[in-house]
Every structure is written in C-alpha cells, then in structure tokens.
Image (cartoon, grey):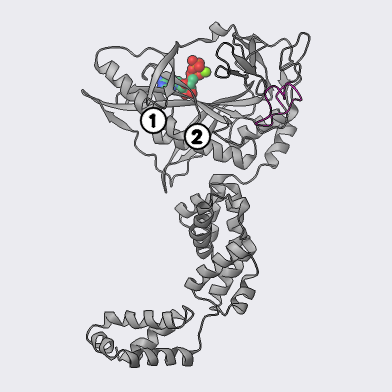
C-alpha cells in the first residue's frame, strides 16, 4: 500500500497557446517471459540464434500441430503478478486474436482477452527521494510473440525469421495513472527492476525483451480527478504509440504527442483515436492505422486449449518463494544500515549490487560501506564498462580494506591506492599493506620529527602562518607529502598547530 511518507508529485503541465494542459498516460508493457522454452512448444528462446533455428512444428503452424502449455511460463506470470501485488486468477483462458501477417503463420495470436491470468495490482514508482506515485495495474495476460519479417536483405524478396514466434510474453496493462514523460519512463524502469528481482524477465530493452505501447491523451487540470471520482467521459481521446523499446524515446514520444494533441484541440479540432509510430530520427509520431477494436480481431476462445486452472496451493508455493523486492529492500537498507533513501535506491537498483553491498556492510558501518560501494567500486566499474558480477574486487576484499581504515592501519587516502591495487592486481588487502609499507604512521615521534624538519626549513612560511592561522594547512600538506601520505592526518594537524603556537 501507499506509504504515507511518500508524496505524489504534481502532474506535468504543458502550457499551450490558449490554456494549460495535463497529460494522462497508460502503458501496455510487453515483457518477454524469462524461460528456456516457448509458451506452447519446446523450442528454444535463445537470443541471436541462426534465423529459423528455434522453430517447432507448432510454431510454424504445421497442419495438425497442437499447442501444449508450458507450466514454467505460467508460473513466471503468476510470480510477476504476485510481485506486483496483484490478484491471481485461478481460472483463466486463452483466446485467438485473428489477423494476417507474414510473420504470424497461424493467422492468429493466442492471447488472453476475456480471462487474463493476473488481475489488478499496483506499482510504486520512485520519482526521487521521498516522492513516489502509485500506478495501478489493470491486468497481466499471457500471449505469444510473433516472428520477424526482414525486408532489407534482398531487393526483390522479403524473408521471415520465426525464432521469436511463440515466445511467451506477459502484457502488463496499466491504468491511465501516469501523468508525465518522466513518470512513464520511471514506471517502465520500476517494472523492469521488479521483474529482474523476480527473475521473470531479463528486461533487455535493446533485444526487444521489454517493449511498451504508450497511450497518451491530454486534458484540462482537474479532469483526471473527475475521472477518478467516476466521470467516465472526463479524459481526452488517446493515441497509442506502438512498440517503444527505449526509455529516452518513450519520453520524447510522449512529449511530442502531447504537444501535437494540444495544437489540434486548441485549433478547434478533435483528436482521432489511432495507433501511431514514433520516428526517433525525426523526433515525431506519425499515424499507422486508426484504432482497431476487439471485434476487428474476431476474438474467440482458442479451441485447442482447455481453460487454464491452477491451484491456490501452487500460487501460495510461488508466493513463499518470492525474494525480497526492491521497495522492501530499500526500506530495510535505510533502517538497518542508516543509509539515505538516495543511497539505498542506488544500491538496490540491481539485485546483484544490493547483495554485494550487504556482504560488505555485514558487521561494518553501513554508511562507510555504502560510500565505498557507490563512489569507489561503482565508479571504477563504470570506467571499465563492467557489471557488478564482473567486479575484480570481491565483497570480502572491499570489507577488509574498510576494516584497515577503521582500525587506523591505513588512512582514507591510502585506502584508495590500496583499492586500486586490489582492483588491478588482486591479493589480500592486509598483506599488500604490509609488503608495500602502506601502514599509516601513528608513531607520534616520527610525525613530530617530520613537522620539526618542515618548520625549520621554511621560516618565511612560519611567519605567515603565525599571522594567518589558515596557512597552517600548508604545513600539514607538506608533512603528509613527506610521509608519503601515511601520517595520521589528525595527528599531523594537532602537532603542526601546537608547534606553530596557534
Ligand atoms: P482498449 O480496451 O481499447 O484496449 P483499454 O481501456 O484496455 O483500451 O486501455 C488500453 C490502455 O490505454 C491502458 O493502458 C489504459 O491505461 C490506457 N488508456 C485508457 N484510456 C486512456 C486515456 N484517456 N488516456 C491515456 N491512456 C488511456
Ligand atoms: Mg485493452
């Protein structure tokens, strides 16, 4: 449920030539189910295979072939529904959505129009520390993906690759609760994050793992609230922008589309409900076809498949196996480790990073661990374009580096050098400190000697510092340099001040 600590942001307002307008957005997200086999066949779903290498007879719609439901894909849809706090329908059913297209050999797509497997749910979309929006999920249904037509390999012919035909998709339909381009992108990001935690969708947008049809309409301020209160006609007519697979383009397309609709309405025209395509090169949407209705597809129950009945016990079993989800993990990081909400968000963005951080923070100061993971480790990995799973520094090694700082064996500055050595060469941090003489000098006698030497060698600076105590920092810097950064900075500060009589 909506945490009262969160506050909903104001909807995006666009000023037209004549009035202010608000945006209303609803998304239909197609998420490829993470599964080795397709929804109704045993063919592989591996990405990047030779064209038509992963096609079973049923995928190619050979006569007499019958679909057989893949139980694992059903479990993945249930798991996703539970992760989105949604109702699971113990009885659902498959329908045929009829249309002709060369990459659809059956002549219909098997989908779930009337009885989807997952009902209403909700997603909390983070819009920065302390700010989030609740987006309601209307339904999730299972359906088959289509194949791919290839028009640019031959001047005279088109080819078809059926590898993707029959791959399981979850269509996640939101209510029109999204109120701006940033929220739309953040919503897709949150779905992706939750599904990656659940292991139900890889969320690789470049590979087409996650695509969104974006419905956009405009309305005058107050109309959305009137719609929420029950006025069915309060919202504007929407246009649907098909098949978006980039967060950046989703935002740009919404922005463009809203301004296009505002111009039409302010000009006295009416927005036509239609399906549009976004052209990233031109930065605009263009009409693809007028909106099709359910009856255009002559939907009917698929006669090849029995209604899908699942047991409550099986759903409970799946529920019991759910991992800790991002919102809960983030809240726990804030309370258990004393992190800021921002740091907790960064650390829980990917489940692997969260696991890494927890291993480092266990039994140590949480904030220090967070700083090291976010600033040093993430920064260093990014420089090399590496994932957390490929980190050359293990959580144990990073933990030991932090322990060496805490125990006073090394200074924070030396710790960064040590981190770089462990990152590039590996090895045990404590051993490296010993063999390379990186231990911090806390021997007061040695520091005093270095300070004396520095003061004796710079009489002019001494005079200046006595008149302006801020200049004492110069001596601290010199002594740190003379000791190779190994002197305890606090001790150097104190001794310099005492010797200069400040
Ligand atoms: P249909 O039955 O025609 O497919 P739905 O009511 O199922 O339409 O809505 C499809 C998608 O469009 C949903 O994600 C929904 O949130 C969104 N949507 C519906 N009405 C609007 C609107 N006025 N403005 C923006 N999005 C909308
Ligand atoms: Mg619909």
User: What residue appears at the point 56 percent right and 16 percent down from the top-left corner?
Assistant: 151
User: What residue appears at the point 67 percent right and 16 percent down from the top-left corner?
Assistant: 94
Q: Which residues are magenta?
A: 38-55
Taking the view exactly as shown, the residue that stands out farthest to the right is: 64
- Can you tell which mark lies on residue 252? 1
| Rendered location of residue 3, percent (x, y) | 47, 44
| Rendered location of residue 411, percent (x, y) | 49, 75
Foreground mark, 1 or 2, reads: 1
The residue carrying mark 2 has its beta carbon less than 8 Å from ligand 1 = no
Q: Nearer the viewer, residue 450 or 17?
A: 450
**Mark 1, other Cα within 10 Å: few <14 / some 14–19 / many ≥20:** some
User: What residue appears at the point 46 percent right and 83 percent down from the top-left corner?
Assistant: 483
Height in image: 64 above or below 27? Answer: above
Task: Locate residue 57 relative to residue 487 in the image: left or right.
Answer: right
Q: Secondary structure at mark 1?
A: helix
Q: Is residue 84 visible?
A: yes
Q: Is residue 311 visible?
A: no
User: What residue appears at the point 74 percent right and 33 percent down from the top-left corner?
Assistant: 314
| Rendered location of residue 21, percent (x, y) | 29, 26
Which residue carries the number 2 mark? Answer: 188
Label total for image:
2
């Amino acid at each position: 449920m909506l945490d009262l600590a969160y506050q909903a942001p104001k909807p995006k307002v666009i000023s037209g030539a004549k009035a202010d307008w608000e945006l209303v957005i609803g998304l239909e997200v197609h998420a490829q189910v993470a599964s080795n086999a397709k929804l109704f066949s045993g063919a592989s779903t591996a990405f990047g295979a030779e064209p038509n290498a992963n096609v079973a007879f049923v995928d190619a719609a050979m006569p007499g072939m019958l679909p057989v439901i893949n139980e694992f894909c059903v479990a993945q849809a249930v798991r996703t529904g539970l992760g989105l706090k949604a109702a699971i329908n113990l009885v659902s059913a498959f329908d045929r959505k009829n249309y002709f297209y060369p990459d659809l050999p059956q002549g219909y797509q098997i989908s779930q129009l009337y009885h989807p497997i997952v009902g209403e749910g909700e997603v909390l979309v983070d819009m920065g520390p302390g700010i989030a929006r609740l987006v309601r999920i209307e339904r999730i249904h299972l359906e088959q993906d289509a194949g791919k037509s290839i028009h640019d390999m031959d001047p005279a012919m088109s080819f078809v690759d059926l590898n993707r035909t029959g791959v399981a998709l979850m269509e996640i339909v939101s209510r029109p609760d999204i109120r701006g381009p940033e929220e739309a992108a953040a919503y897709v990001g949150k779905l992706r994050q939750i599904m990656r935690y659940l292991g139900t969708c890889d969320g690789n947008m470049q590979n087409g793992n996650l695509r969104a049809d974006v419905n956009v309409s405009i309305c005058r301020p107050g109309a959305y609230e009137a719609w929420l209160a029950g006025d069915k006609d309060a919202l504007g007519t929407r246009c649907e922008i098909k098949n978006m697979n980039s967060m950046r383009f989703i935002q740009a397309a919404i922005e463009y589309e809203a301004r296009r609709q505002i111009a039409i309405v302010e000009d006295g025209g009416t927005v036509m409900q239609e399906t549009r395509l976004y052209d990233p090169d031109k930065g605009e949407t263009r009409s693809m076809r007028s909106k099709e209705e359910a009856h255009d597809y002559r939907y009917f129950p698929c006669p090849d498949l029995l209604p899908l009945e699942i047991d409550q016990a099986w759903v409970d079993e799946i529920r019991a196996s759910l991992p800790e989800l991002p919102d809960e993990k983030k809240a726990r990081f804030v309370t258990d480790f004393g992190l800021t909400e921002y740091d907790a968000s960064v650390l829980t963005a990917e489940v692997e990073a969260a696991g890494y951080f927890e291993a480092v923070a266990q039994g140590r100061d949480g904030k220090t661990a967070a700083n090291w993971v976010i600033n040093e480790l993430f920064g260093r990995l990014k420089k090399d374009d590496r994932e957390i799973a490929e980190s050359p520094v293990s959580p144990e090694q990073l933990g030991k580096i932090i322990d060496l700082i805490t125990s006073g064996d090394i200074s924070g500055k030396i710790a960064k050098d040590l981190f770089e050595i462990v990152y590039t060469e590996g090895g045990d941090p404590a051993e490296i400190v010993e063999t390379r003489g990186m231990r911090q000098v806390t021997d007061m006698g040695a520091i005093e000697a270095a300070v004396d030497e520095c003061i004796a060698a710079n009489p002019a600076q001494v005079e200046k510092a006595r008149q302006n105590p801020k200049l004492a920092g110069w001596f601290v810097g010199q002594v740190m340099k003379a000791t190779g950064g190994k002197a305890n900075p606090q001790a150097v500060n104190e001794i310099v001040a005492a010797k200069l009589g400040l």
